[in-house]
């Protein structure tokens, strides 16, 4: 049986290493597109540092909640890095990252306690 992992540890891991699993859970629940924070070079987008979902209002949803693209990119900024976003498909995320069924289940079960209440809410036009 897997050891219990607390919400704080899931949040920490959701920003560093297990973000892809959380993004898959959110994607599977909502159908929102997966996006990756990546290095942008003259050869195009390379590497993926972080995975999130893009909500219908264009905000990104990750373990920190629903945030503007620039705020998510700032989390991974470092001197000399030129970061951007690239669309990712589910197969790429599942195959390229740690798509462990135990972690998927942990994040699925913890989702209500993990994300702010409005993180998965659909935006209402005109409000």
Image (cartoon, rainbow, N blue to C red):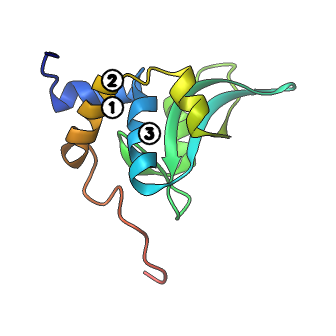
Callout 1: SS: helix
Which one is in front in this view, the residue at disc 3 or the one at disc 2? 3
Local packing at callout 3 (Cα closer than 10 Å; few below 14, some 14-19, many 20+) is many
- The mark tally for this picture is 3
Looking at the image, residue 79 sits to the left or right of residue 52; the answer is right
Task: Provide the residue designation for mark 3.
Answer: 23
Judge by depth and name the residue closer to the eye, 39 or 97.
97
Query: What residue appears at the point 35 percent right and 39 percent down from the top-left corner?
Result: 63
Q: In the rendered structure, which disc, 3 or 1, sits on the residue that comes first in sequence?
A: 3
Callout 2: SS: helix
Task: Provide the residue designation for mark 2.
Answer: 13
Task: Provide the residue designation for mark 1.
Answer: 104
Residue 50 rendering spot, x and y as whole percentages: 52, 29
Callout 3: SS: helix
Which one is in front in this view, the residue at disc 3 or the one at disc 1? 1
Residue 115 rendering spot, x and y as whole percentages: 28, 47
Judge by depth and name the residue closer to the eye, 113 or 3.
3
Judge by depth and name the residue closer to the eye, 84 or 46.
46
Query: What residue appears at the point 55 percent right and 30 percent down from the top-left corner?
Result: 93
State how far apart marks 3 and 1 are (Cα).
10 Å
Query: What residue appears at the point 28 percent right and 35 percent down from the top-left corner?
Result: 107
Local packing at callout 2 (Cα closer than 10 Å; few below 14, some 14-19, many 20+) is some
Q: Quadrant of residue 111?
A: top left
Figure check: 99 above or below 63 = above
State how far apart marks 1 and 2 are (Cα).
13 Å
Local packing at callout 1 (Cα closer than 10 Å; few below 14, some 14-19, many 20+) is some
Residue 13 rendering spot, x and y as whole percentages: 33, 23
Q: Looking at the image, do the residues carrying marks 1 and 2 touch, with CB atoms under 8 Å apart?
A: no
């Amino acid at each position: 049986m897997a050891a219990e992992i607390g919400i704080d540890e899931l949040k920490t891991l959701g920003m560093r290493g297990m973000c892809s699993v959380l993004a898959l859970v959110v994607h599977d629940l909502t159908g929102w597109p997966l996006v990756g924070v990546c290095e942008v070079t003259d050869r195009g987008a390379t590497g993926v540092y972080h995975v999130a979902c893009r909500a219908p209002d264009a905000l990104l949803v990750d373990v920190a909640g629903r945030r503007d693209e620039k705020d998510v990119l700032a989390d991974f900024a470092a001197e000399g890095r030129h970061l951007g976003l690239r669309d990712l498909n589910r197969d790429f995320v599942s195959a390229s990252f740690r798509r462990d069924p135990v972690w998927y289940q942990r994040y699925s079960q913890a989702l209500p306690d993990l994300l702010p209440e409005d993180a998965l809410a659909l935006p209402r036009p005109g409000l």
